[in-house]
Image: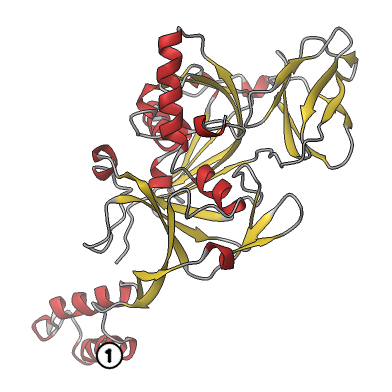
């Protein structure tokens, strides 16, 4: 049986690379209503590629392979800006208009929220994570976060109109993160967030850089990015991934629906004839509670399927830059080259497995909408297309490397 205490989905709107050796560029002008904006920072989401606009607001990003990219623009006094750009067979020219980050008078009043610290702590855990790497991360500007909790929906939402700055001293990155949205439902325990990260290298000595590289290698291998890259290249088995299905079976601990309904109806009939207040002793409260709980139990539960899934039958070509897959049951992905850590085993993300299944890192992937399309670098095209459980739900921003990260053996 497969269980999970916490479900998680992460969608990063990232660019991708393909194998063509031909490169192109993205250039253009950054301006406001008055004219060009010199000094604006221009970044590629998910990468370490950036530039600064010249005195006229012009910028140029070169040596880009065909693909889909997200441009991020940052300028003091203006709202963060993002724009999707597709490079196919020629360079692209864009004109970017920024809006001033004005604060209206009716927004100046700041209400003291006694729960803000608690909500920021929750956001940090669910956004950055609780892994050993995540614990070496720090949000440098938490004051830019706009936090709201809807009691009626048990929904925590976090937004920002500025780049969130996260310093990762485990992997040696400083992230500028444009957060599109963050949602955590404490009833369903499902996390959704989406955004655009830009990676900067932290300054470090040669010895420190070596430690960063080792930590990045560990973070990359076995990740969802590594998995989808290997699927794209038809090398998932070679890279150490085994795929099984999680199938639905009738819950053996639940009585048939007709039996449950008959017993509840019989109890209610007795209650109507006697009246609970008049003849309370004739109503078996314990029995009513038992059948009510039976009614609330899930009709089906998840079970680990022993049959291996052939990746070649799962993955299909969508176009020259995208592949896609679709399935009805959840996928169970094992990474056989790493064992689950003790730190992970002590969290609520742990996924139960049959006793004879090795303690490999296991992640469960459920489709929320089909099909799911993905790029050569492991980036996912379809927003909110997948729900992660297990190890990939455990690893979040604190264990993320750039989308153009190249492991040592391929350099």
Snapshot quadrant of residue 87: top right
Snapshot quadrant of residue 341: top left
In the rendered view, does 401 fall on the left or right side of 343? right
Residue drawn at the location 25% of the way across and 89% of the way down: 272
Snapshot quadrant of residue 271: bottom left
Numbered disc 1: secondary structure: helix
Q: Position of residue 320 (x, y in %)?
A: 76, 52
Identify whether 385 is placed above or below 77. Answer: below
Identify whether 30 is placed above or below 251. Answer: above
Q: Is residue 74 visible?
A: no
Q: Position of residue 27 (x, y in %)?
A: 86, 24
Identify whether 192 is placed above or below 371. Answer: above
In the rendered view, does 98 fall on the left or right side of 408? right
Residue drawn at the location 86% of the way across and 7% of the way down: 55
Which residue corresponds to mark 1? Answer: 259
Identify whether 130 is placed above or below 164. Answer: below
Q: Is residue 76 visible?
A: yes
Quarter of the image containing the C terminus?
Answer: top right
Residue drawn at the location 52% of the way across and 32% of the way down: 407
Q: Position of residue 300 (x, y in %)?
A: 36, 75
Q: Position of residue 221 (x, y in %)?
A: 45, 39
- Label 1 crowd bin: few (<14), some (14–19), many (20+), radius 10 Å: few
């Amino acid at each position: 049986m497969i269980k999970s205490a916490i479900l998680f989905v992460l969608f990063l709107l990232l660019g991708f690379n393909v194998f063509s050796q031909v490169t192109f560029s993205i250039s253009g002008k950054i301006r406001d209503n008055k004219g060009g904006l010199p000094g604006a920072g221009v970044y590629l989401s998910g990468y370490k590629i950036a530039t600064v606009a010249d005195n006229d607001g012009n910028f140029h990003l070169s040596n880009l392979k065909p693909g889909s990219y997200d441009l991020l623009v940052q300028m003091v006094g203006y709202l963060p800006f993002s724009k999707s750009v597709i490079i196919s067979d020629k360079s692209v020219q864009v004109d970017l208009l920024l809006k001033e980050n004005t604060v209206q008078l009716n927004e100046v009043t700041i209400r003291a929220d006694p729960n803000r610290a608690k909500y920021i702590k929750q956001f940090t855990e669910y956004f950055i994570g609780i892994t050993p790497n995540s614990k070496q991360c720090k949000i440098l500007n938490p004051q830019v976060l706009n936090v709201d909790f809807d009691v009626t929906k048990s929904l925590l939402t976090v937004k920002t109109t500025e780049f969130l700055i996260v310093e990762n001293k485990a992997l040696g990155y400083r992230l500028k993160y444009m957060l599109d949205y963050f949602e955590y439902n404490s009833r369903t325990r499902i996390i959704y967030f989406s955004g655009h990260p830009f990676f900067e290298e932290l300054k470090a000595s040669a010895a420190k850089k070596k430690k960063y590289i080792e930590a990045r290698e560990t973070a990359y291998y076995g990740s969802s990015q590594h998995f989808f890259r290997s699927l794209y290249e038809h090398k998932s088995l070679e890279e150490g991934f085994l795929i099984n299905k999680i199938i639905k079976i009738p819950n053996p601990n639940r009585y048939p629906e007709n039996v449950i309904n008959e017993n509840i109806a019989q109890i209610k009939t007795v209650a109507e004839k006697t009246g609970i207040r008049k003849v309370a002793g004739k109503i078996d409260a314990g029995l009513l509670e038992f059948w009510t709980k039976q009614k609330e139990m899930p009709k089906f539960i998840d079970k680990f399927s022993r049959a291996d899934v052939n990746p070649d039958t799962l993955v299909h070509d969508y176009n020259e830059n995208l592949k896609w897959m679709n399935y009805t049951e959840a996928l169970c992905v094992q990474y056989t080259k790493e064992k689950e850590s003790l730190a992970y085993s002590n969290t609520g993300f742990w996924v139960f497995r049959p006793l004879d299944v090795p303690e490999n890192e296991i992640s469960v992937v459920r489709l929320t909408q089909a099909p799911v399309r993905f790029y050569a670098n492991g980036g996912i095209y379809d927003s909110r297309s997948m729900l992660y459980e297990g190890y990939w739900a455990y690893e979040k921003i604190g264990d993320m490397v750039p989308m153009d990260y190249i492991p040592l053996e391929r350099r």
